[in-house]
């Protein structure tokens, strides 16, 4: 089974979780590690000859070293690009953390060094009327990697998300600073310095905004020592 599995979440939707997840996979690949990736729920899929397909899930399929079918990577493909619980309701699909955990456990049981499970939106995105997506990593007892988009307001979003993760009994194993947009925020250096101390977790990388950048090229901006740390041990909360 996979030696280490992490859940990847973000401070919000549109912060670059998939690019960061794929970059982490490429960095691990470059270190000679075997990797798996899962995006259990993807909202915003296109109809193809093979069925509904999501670009983010396809990117993760390409970035991982170990071959998985599309259905293993993305068991719940939803057509509408709206909140997952709403898209599932409209499609007549029942989402639950336990059901998602069952699919994830099947992939996590395959041999690999690293498995990354990408969430949807932020930490409290609903799965159904009673559960948020946070319930999935709780069910699986997974450490969490937090993606922080460097923009005005990110300190508040990052600290609140980290606080929620820890209150849910999980470890913030590391975080990645990402620039999802071209506009560079004011006081960026001060923001990075503050978050590096306040989040009390390793910064795994500092990804620039590069027009048409590939996840493979962004992997060069991740810290190799931090990637090695993810495999060898968990960071204590």
Image: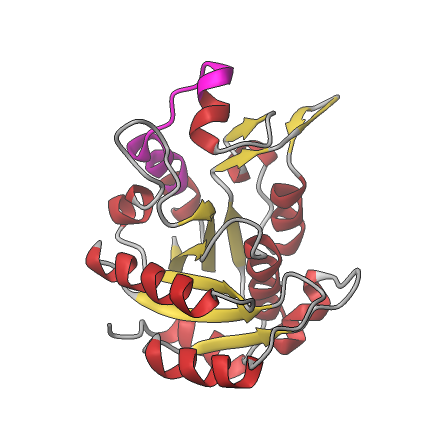
Q: Is residue 112 visible?
A: no
- Residue 81 in magenta? no
Q: Position of residue 100 (x, y in %)?
A: 37, 35
Residue at the image position 31 percent from the left and 71 percent from the top:
234
Q: Position of residue 63 (x, y in %)?
A: 64, 55
Q: Position of residue 73 (x, y in %)?
A: 54, 40
In the visual, does 57 lie left or right of 131?
right
| Camera-side residue of 113 and 150 | 150
Residue at the image position 47 percent from the left and 32 percent from the top:
84
Q: Position of residue 220 (x, y in %)?
A: 66, 76
In the visual, does 150 lie left or right of 198?
right
Q: Is residue 12 visible?
A: yes
| Camera-side residue of 172 and 219 | 172
Residue at the image position 20 percent from the left and 58 percent from the top:
167
Placement of 139 over or under 205, stated as above or below:
above
| Camera-side residue of 172 and 65 | 172
In the visual, does 227 lie left or right of 64?
left
Instruction: Give the residues drawn in magenta, as a range.
Output: 89-104
Placement of 74 over or under 15, stated as above or below:
above
- Residue 100 in magenta? yes
The image quadrant of residue 180 is bottom right
Placement of 113 over or under 187, stated as above or below:
above
Q: What secondary structure prevails in the magenta region?
A: helix
Placement of 102 over or under 48, stated as above or below:
below
Number of numbered discs: 0
């Amino acid at each position: 089974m996979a030696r280490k599995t992490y859940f990847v979440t973000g401070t919000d939707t549109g912060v670059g979780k998939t690019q960061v997840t794929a970059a982490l996979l490429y960095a691990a690949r470059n270190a000679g590690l075997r990797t798996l990736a899962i995006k259990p729920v993807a909202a915003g899929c296109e109809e193809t000859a093979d069925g509904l397909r999501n670009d983010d899930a396809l990117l993760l399929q390409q970035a991982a070293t170990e071959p998985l079918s599309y259905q293993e990577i993305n068991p719940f493909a939803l057509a509408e690009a709206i909140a997952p619980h709403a898209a599932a309701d409209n499609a007549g699909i029942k989402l639950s953390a336990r059901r998602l955990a069952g699919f994830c456990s099947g992939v996590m049981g395959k041999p690999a060094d690293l498995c990354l499970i990408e969430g949807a939106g932020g930490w409290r995105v609903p799965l159904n009327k009673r559960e948020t997506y946070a319930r999935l990593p709780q069910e699986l007892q997974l450490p969490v990697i937090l993606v922080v988009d460097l923009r005005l307001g990110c300190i508040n979003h990052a600290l609140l998300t980290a606080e929620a993760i820890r209150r849910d009994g999980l470890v913030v194993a590391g975080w990645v600073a990402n620039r999802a947009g071209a506009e560079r925020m004011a006081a960026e250096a001060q923001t990075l310095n503050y978050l590096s101390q306040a989040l009390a977790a390793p910064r795994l990388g500092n990804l620039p905004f590069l027009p048409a950048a590939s996840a493979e090229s962004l992997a060069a901006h991740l810290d190799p020592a931090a990637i090695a740390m993810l495999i060898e041990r968990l960071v204590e909360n």
